[in-house]
Amino acid sequence: MGYRIVVVGATGNVGREMLNILDERKFPVDEIAVLASRKSLGTEVSFGDRTLKTQDLDTFDFTGWDMALFAVGSEATAKYAPVAAKAGCTVIDNSSLYRYDPDIPLIVPEVNPDAIEGYAKKNIIANPNCSTAQMVVALKPLHDRATIKRVVVSTYQSVSGSGKEAMEELWNQTKGMYVPGQEVEPSVYPKQIAFNVIPHIDVFLDSGDTKEEWKMVAETKKIVDPAIKVTATCVRVPVFVGHSESINIEFEDFLDEDEARDILREAPGIMVVDKREDGGYITPVECVGDYATYISRIRQDTTIENGLNLWCVSDNLRKGAALNAVQIAELLGRRVLKKG
C-alpha cells in the first residue's frame, strides 16, 4: 500500500525535479496529482514513463491525500498550504514561509530527523534554503565530533536558484555577448549575470546583510545548534545549476584534517573527493543530477586555534530543494504514516 501524493507547482524547475526524484527513488505512490496555477492549467509534465496534465490548484480538494510537496512561492503557499494541512494532507513546503515558525519543523533528514515528530502541530514541514541544506549536511558530523563555534561561508550560487527566467537571462546574455546589437539588458538581476558575479541574493536588510545571508544564519541555528555563530556572503554566479560554498569552520576542540576527511566519508549524503592534484575536487558542473553533497579541499586553517576549511558543492535543484523534500516525505512515511 502506497501514498496519495500531490506536487504543487509541478511545472516549475523544482516541481519537475520532485517528480523525477519520486520516480527515481521508487517512492511508493498509489496515486499522484500535479497542480499548477490557472495560467499553466493543462500543461503536461512527466512522471516516469507517464505523462500527467496539471490540475487547478485553486479548486483542488486535498481531502484524502497523504502528502503535498509544495514548490511554489510564499504568497501561494500562504494561501493553499493551510487548506491542504486542514484537510489532513501533510504539507512539505519548499518556500521560506514557514522555516522560522517555532511550531513547524525545519528538516534535513541526514541532520535532524527526530525533529519530524513536531510536524503534527500544524501538519506542515519546512524545507530549508538551498544554500543552507548542503552546508548543514557537511557541518553536522563535524559538529558532533568537535563542536562548532563559528562558521564563515561564502557561496557561489547558480542562477537556477532564481527560476527559469534567470536561466534564460544567463543564456540570452551569454549569446548576446557574441552578436553585436543583440545585447540583453538585465531584468531578473540588478546587473549583468553573464561573465560576471553579483554579491546580492534576495533583498537587503538594515544590517547590510541580504536576506539570503540571514537565512543561512537562522536556519543553521534551527537545524544544527542555536549556539553556532554564522556569517555569510552569498554571491550569484554565471552557472546554470549547482551551488558551491567555501566554508571556514572554527571548533571548540581540535579536529585534524585527516580525521575530518574520514568522518565526512562515513557521513550520510556526502561524497568526499579530495585529492591534492589538478582536478582532484568537484565543481558544480560535475554534481548536476547527483544526490550527494560533495566535499573537497579539506585542510587545516592555521590562522585560528581549531580551524578547518572545506569546499562544498551540490545540485541546488536536488539536495537544495526537490531531493530534500522527497527525503522528508520518505522520513515521514517511515516514522509516522507507515503505509509504504
Image (tube, rainbow, N blue to C red):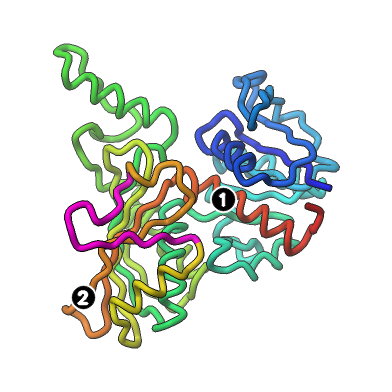
Image height of 32 relative to 305, above or below: above
Percent from the top left, x then y, of residue 260?
35, 75
Image height of 169 relative to 134, above or below: above
Q: Amino acid at mark 1?
A: Leu
Q: Quadrant of residue 207?
A: bottom left
Which portion, as a residue range, is magenta? 269-284
Q: Residues within 10 Å of mark 1 (few under 14, many from 20)?
A: some
Q: Earlier in the sequence, mark 2 or mark 1?
A: 1
Helix, strand or loop under label 1: loop
Q: Residues within 10 Å of mark 2 (few under 14, many from 20)?
A: some
- Residue at 43% of width from left, 77% of height from top? 143
Is 321 colored magenta in this rendering? no
Percent from the top left, x then y, of residue 229?
37, 74
Q: Quadrant of residue 112?
A: bottom right
Q: Nearer the viewer, mark 2 or mark 1?
A: 2
Helix, strand or loop under label 2: strand
Q: Which mark is residue 97?
A: 1
Q: Which mark is residue 69?
A: none
- Residue at 60% of width from left, 34% of height from top? 9
- Residue at 16% of width from left, 78% of height from top? 303
Q: Amino acid at mark 2?
A: Asp
Q: Is residue 233 visible?
A: no
Image height of 139 relative to 85, above or below: below
Look at the magenta stretch and give its main secondary structure: loop
Is 277 colored magenta in this rendering? yes
- In this figure, which residue is indicated by the disc labeled 2? 301
Percent from the top left, x then y, of residue 200?
29, 46
